[in-house]
Amino acid sequence: MKTLNWWPLIGGLILAVPMAAQANPNDPDSDGDGIADRYERMLSTNPSDPNSKPSDLDADGIPDEYDLDIDGDGVNNWQDPFPKNPQEFADRDGDGVGDAKDGDSDGDGFSNEVEKAAGTNPYSKSSFPDDQGPVVDLVDIPEVVTERIIDIRGMALDTGMGVDKVQVVNEEGEIFKGHFLYTTHFAVKVRLNKGLNTLQLAVTDKANNLSRRLVEVDYQP
């Protein structure tokens, strides 16, 4: 509230002259502009003038120069790629577009909508729609062998989430687990029964897609 000083003039007239508001030592915010006097003095604005005040983007009473979260989105400035945008606080794929506006937040080539429909995580680059099984190529195996224990070898490549496991199942349901020699090349050690063996090679990827190959081997000791 402005204070009026009354000045007597010649002729008996009295003139009311407004005085500038003075800082009130009992009021932490003398001019009522939302910024405490102590901040205004620190930043060289006028604590007695509501039109002179520091910038306070989130209107929390802490000037931007001293505010650890300038936009008030709950993420500290040093962790926020958009410290002055309250609508954006993350950019998972680092493309300069905040996740709130980015149609492909994790940058894996699949839109957020497609990933949500497929049940994958639109914010994780290692999680994306994958409905194709691995590509499998077998090394030629002789039709007739004289060794009971043989190696079934080949290559398995998955351009989606990657190959998870490889195994061979015989007609009795016995499972022989394989291992990768390096990158895409695998080997499965299998024990044969005398006579014709019909084996099923199964390669599974990390999205649980399965590729199968039938292998027939005649064991004649």
Image: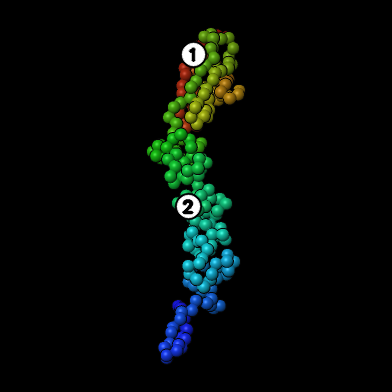
Which residue appears farthest toward the front when viewing the image?
11
Q: Amino acid at mark 1?
A: Glu
Q: Amino acid at mark 2?
A: Asn
Crowd rating for badge 2 (residues with CA inside 10 Å; few <14, some 14–19, many 20+): some
Residue 190 in view, yes or no: no
Whole-percent x, y for residue 217 in the image: 51, 12
The N terminus, quarter of image: bottom left
Whole-percent x, y for residue 215 in the image: 49, 15
Whole-percent x, y for residue 93 in the image: 51, 40
Residue closer to the observer: 142 or 66: 66
Q: Which residue is mark 2?
A: 85
Q: Which residue is mark 1?
A: 216
Residue drawn at 47 percent across, 43 percent down:
97
Residue drawn at 56 percent across, 50 percent down:
79
Which residue appears farthest toward the bottom when viewing the image?
12
Nearest to the eye among marks 1 and 2: give it: 2
Whole-percent x, y for residue 155 in the image: 54, 20
Q: Is residue 88 above or below residue 209?
A: below
Residue closer to the observer: 28 or 178: 28
